Image: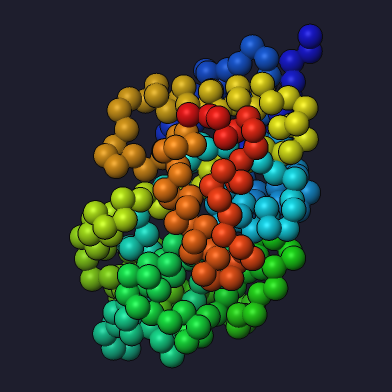
Amino acid sequence: MDRLKLKAVLGSHLHVRSVKSGELRSDRFDLDFFDYTPTNTAFKPMVREQAFDVCEMAIVTYLMAKAHCKPLVLLPATMLGRFQHSYALYNPAHGTLGPSDLEGKRVGIRSFTTTTGAWIRGILANDCGVNLDNIRWVTFEDPHVAEYVDTTERAPKDKKILQMLLDGELDAVLGEASNDPKLKTLFPDPAAEAAKWYARRGVVPVNHLVVVTEQLAKSHPDVVAGVYDLLKQNKEQIGAAATPDLVPFGFEANRKPLQLIVDYAFQQSLIPRRYAVEDLFDETTRGLN
């Protein structure tokens, strides 16, 4: 039987290196990797054209794709997870700013639909009491899901997000990190805030997981399970996970973060209803642990 050749995009993560190099491989299929840098540039062609068989994808992009009936299926394999408190910046030259001071301010974000943005807005709304509707959102890119109607203010095409913050044209930005000594994090001690947040929520904010096309999932469910097994094997190969595990694998391990990001995405009108975590998977991928 001919081996299946699958077009794939995964980021340069330590826990997928052996799969990407071909050191770990299946006897049933080959993964033909395409390089997209940064990885998020692959999300749009995957959502809009199903350009690959297997693709890393931001979870909010997937939730929105599901809401618009895109033929994709989620695997419970986290590629990127991180605490988000350090990805909110302001310029102290224009006055001290904290999380609770953002109402009435101009806040920049690459796209309103980014997963990091959704996580941070969820933290601001649910843990800091911020009314997100009272913030003037300024964006720089279209959503990956074309059907989503973006009502935010669009930055001029020649403007860069961090330069606008330095120039005082934005009061804060979300989803960015910078070593510029002129900028500070909105949360004064992001690591301490993240630790407190984790103690309260018990959730690792997952950013990127893996999706496959519905066509592959329906025609070759065994291959989809095989892709997951390869990725899991690679993760186990690199040794013990950190505590907490920032790249959880398995349906149950991802249940709490997925439920929380569904809640946040619904609160922020990114999706029309709260999905049950079970609904994000198909019969095969729901059983992966």
Residue 59, percent from left and from top: 55, 51
Regarding residue 148, the answer to whether it shows in the image is: yes
Regarding residue 171, the answer to whether it shows in the image is: no
For the point 74% across and 20% down, the residue is 4
- The residue lying toward the viewer, choosing from 25 and 221, is 221
Asked whether, in this view, residue 48 is left or right of residue 101, the answer is: right
For the point 43% across and 50% down, the residue is 257
Q: Is residue 48 above or below residue 164?
A: above
- The residue lying toward the viewer, choosing from 27 and 256, is 256
- The residue lying toward the viewer, choosing from 6 and 71, is 71
For the point 44% across and 37% down, the residue is 252
Q: Quadrant of residue 120?
A: bottom left
For the point 43% across and 67% down, the residue is 122
Q: How many marks?
A: 0
Q: Quadrant of residue 171?
A: bottom left
Colour setting:
rainbow
Q: Quadrant of residue 266?
A: bottom right
Residue 130, percent from left and from top: 38, 79
Residue 33, percent from left and from top: 64, 32
Q: Quarter holding the N terminus?
A: top right
Residue 15, percent from left and from top: 43, 32
Asked whether, in this view, residue 222 is left or right of residue 71, the answer is: left
Q: Is residue 211 above or below residue 153?
A: above
